[in-house]
Amino acid sequence: MPRPPSPSIPEKEFVHGALKQSLRVDGRAMLEMRTPTLTFGPELGWVECAMGKTRVLAQVDGKMVKPPPERPLEGMITIHSELSPMASNEYEPGRPSEEEVTLTRMLDKVLRRSDTVDKESLCVLAGQRVWHIRLTIHILSNSGNMVDCACLAGIVALKHFRRPEVEVVGDEVTIHHPSERAPVPLSMHHTPFCLTFAFFPDPSTPPLLDPSHLEETLSAGLLSVALNAQRELCVVQKAGGIPLAPDDVLKIMDIAVTKARELDKLVEARLQEDWKTRNVEVR
């Protein structure tokens, strides 16, 4: 499959010239995000997130398993991401690209290692039965900044999901069908959001938030920050590129906190709207 052509020299010069004047090709301000659109599927835990033309589908399911002997009191969470040629003709089937490896690592850090979901609450019977929660991420279309879009889709899917109610009597475990008893939301410690900033070779060009595919390609470095609305920092990841002064990083953190709070409000509002249409009990 032919790879897409690199940006031409006039295209590069035009974009760099515009960014020096704080102008972006798509008309956004330098620190303006594409407003995420969240679409919920027929089942709880099924969410499609779109940021501009970047689209990601996240799906959560749970099953009961025997825990590993070294962690008998904790449930399990696994994250699987798929980046296929459907997202862009840059990607080849069956061979994990560098972007896919970066995406999988970032999802793992933001959604699993930061203890987003309380793993102990997933334990049903110590050493015998625990919930195994599996989050699957499909990149449907990559038009830039798929990491932020995938992290947002993943966290919303985890918040949207409900697991069946379970009753334990002695060593006997009964899983109740949703029609018998209302399913239970996952117990979550916090809601981290990932925000990516792009930097450019010319120091007079200010950093920009939520880069498009062209801006990502022409940037000299990307900095991804994951934090929640309570100002708790979970992940800072800088993938190569130009060095950044500590002051620049601190300025970015302040911007990221504001954006994380805005995203938190947007996500909560959309979840409440969806739950009202389903008559789901909000706990």
Image: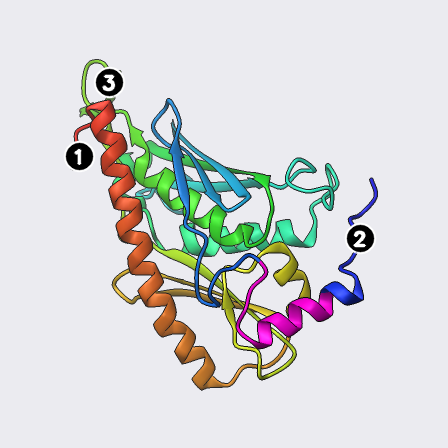
For mark 1, give the secondary structure.
loop
Residue beneath label 3, please?
A: 176
The residue type indicated by label 2 comes to Pro
The residue nearer to you, when weighing 169 against 269, is 269
Q: Residue 197: x and y, percent?
A: 51, 66
Residue beneath label 2, please?
A: 5
The residue type indicated by label 1 comes to Val
Q: Which residues are magenta?
A: 12-25
Instruction: From the viewer's perspective, tell me whether residue 237 is left or right of residue 241.
Output: left
**Mark closer to the chain start, 2 or 3:** 2
Q: Residue 264: x and y, percent?
A: 29, 52
**Mark closer to the chain start, 1 or 3:** 3
Circles 1 and 3 in contact, beta carbons < 8 Å: no
Q: How busy is the neighbourhood of tag 3: few (under 14 within 10 Å), some, or many (20 plus)?
A: some
Distance from label 1 to label 3 (Cα)? 19 Å
- Whether 158 is drawn above or below 22: the answer is above
Residue beneath label 1, please?
A: 282
- Whether 262 is drawn above or below 237: the answer is above
The residue nearer to you, when weighing 279 against 53, is 53
Say which residue appears at 31% left-offset and 35% top-offset.
Answer: 160
Query: Is residue 30 something one can see in this rendering?
Result: yes
Circles 2 and 3 in contact, beta carbons < 8 Å: no
